[in-house]
Amino acid sequence: MTGSGIGSGAADGSSALVGLPLLEDLPDLAGRRVLVRVDFNVPLEEDAHGALRVADDFRIRRALPTLRRLVDQGARVTACSHLGRPPDAPDPRWEMAPVRAALDDLLPGITLLENLRFSPGEKHNDPAFVDSLVDGADIYVNEAFSASHRAHASIVGPPSRLPSAAGLELAREVEVLAGLLRSPKRPFVAVVGGAKIADKLGILEVLAQKVDVLAVGGAMAFTFLAAQGHRVGDSLVDPSHMDACARLLTGDRSGGAESTGVRRGQVLLPTDTVALGPEEAVEIVGADVPDGWRGLDIGPETARTFSEVIADAATVFWNGPLGVVEDERFAAGTSEVARAVASCPGFTAVGGGDSVSALRHLGLANRVNFLSTGGGASLEFLERGDLPGLAALRDAPNAARLRVPEP
């Protein structure tokens, strides 16, 4: 079901593409040199001989339709990407050679530049680095939605210098995610997990106004539970955000003065927890976690509750693991939610990262309507309605004729 139409459950988000130049808005590509920003920040592993290779080519494959279309139209394509977090300098551990080999196996003939983050000019959006990227290029295409929340040189620089367009996947991301918030089919259920409440409080506040049910799991749920007065033991809690969590639960976002009066959907929190205690003991406890224990996964009762609301949904958005999935003892909750999302008859969208990995690990990725390539970018787009990379494309020289005249 991956990549199926929005009409299968989500709202039409095509209006979000207004003013955004698409591939069909580009001039004739025959013989043109096209620079494509991709996100090939993929996991690497060592083979039997100690050489690095790509462990998961999901992001590479998602860029192939755009790359193929450009090649089929006669373009000479150069792709560029970051990989890992090198210290703004060349680092053999993060060279693009393994990625280049994987790309060549899938689509020969594409030139892939060295890791963009080997230069400090990338993250600092240095005009001189932008100049070096676009040197010799005729056209720019952004096919890196998952990096478009960063105002980096390769994202926001080229559109100011070249005719530019959104890649097929980037346009699809914008269309689907915008459609989720505009008029989704209901019931609309969002499941959000992860560790740090500070990273996701903004999107939780947005979703709480849009969805019928907001299910919160992962470590960040314990800040909400603590705000309700529950004991959380040694679980991860962010005291600086407890007041904000309490306001979200009560519908008051006014900073404590008075309720906004916004009608909110139901917020579901864990009612039981899989906790790690002394001497590596693992037990299922209730919403209250004993002292000396740390909650690391939603419990079976919570997983069933989340799964039941997902089963009844017409639209589902899921982002973030519900437990410490790298440890099998605390992966059951995420796995059960993944199965529920895959079985849901409504429109299902999954927002990148560990959520997509869980589906792929279980062999369920093809049973979800839309898999986003961007975790943080997806959340930022849903929260703010725009990204630096999208704004840059709308300001490209060839985008002027696409703009809607002001009244």
Image: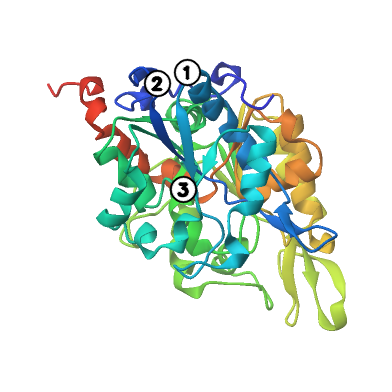
Q: Which of 322 and 369 is in front in this view?
A: 369
Find residue 263 and report its image quarter.
Answer: top left
- Numbered marks: total: 3
Measure how far apart labels 1 and 3 are at the Cα level.
26 Å
Q: In the rendered view of the protein, which quadrant contains the N terminus?
A: top right
One can see residue 271 in this view: no
302 displayed left or right of 143:
right
Q: Which callout, 2 or 1, points at the residue further toward the start of the chain?
A: 2
Measure how far apart labels 2 and 1 are at the Cα level.
6 Å
Q: Which residue in the structure is indicated by mark 3?
A: 147
Q: Which callout, 3 or 2, points at the residue further toward the start of the chain?
A: 2
Instruction: State the SS at label 3.
Output: helix
Compared with 156, 226 (above or below) is below
- Residue 105 placement (x, y as % from top left): 70, 37
Residue for point 39% across, 24% down: 22
Measure how far apart labels 3 and 2 are at the Cα level.
25 Å
- Amino acid under label 3? Ala
- Amino acid under label 2? Leu
Q: Which residue in the structure is indicated by mark 2?
A: 29
**In this rendering, the label closer to the viewer, 3 or 2:** 2
Q: Which of 382 and 300 is in front in this view?
A: 382
One can see residue 281 in this view: yes
Q: Which residue in the structure is indicated by mark 1?
A: 73
- Amino acid under label 1? Gln
Given contact means CB atoms under 8 Å apart, are the residues at marks 2 and 1 in contact? yes
Query: Mark 1, residues whose alpha carbon is within 10 Å: few (<14), some, or many (≥20)?
Result: few
- Residue 113 placement (x, y as % from top left): 49, 48
Residue for point 60% across, 45% down: 352
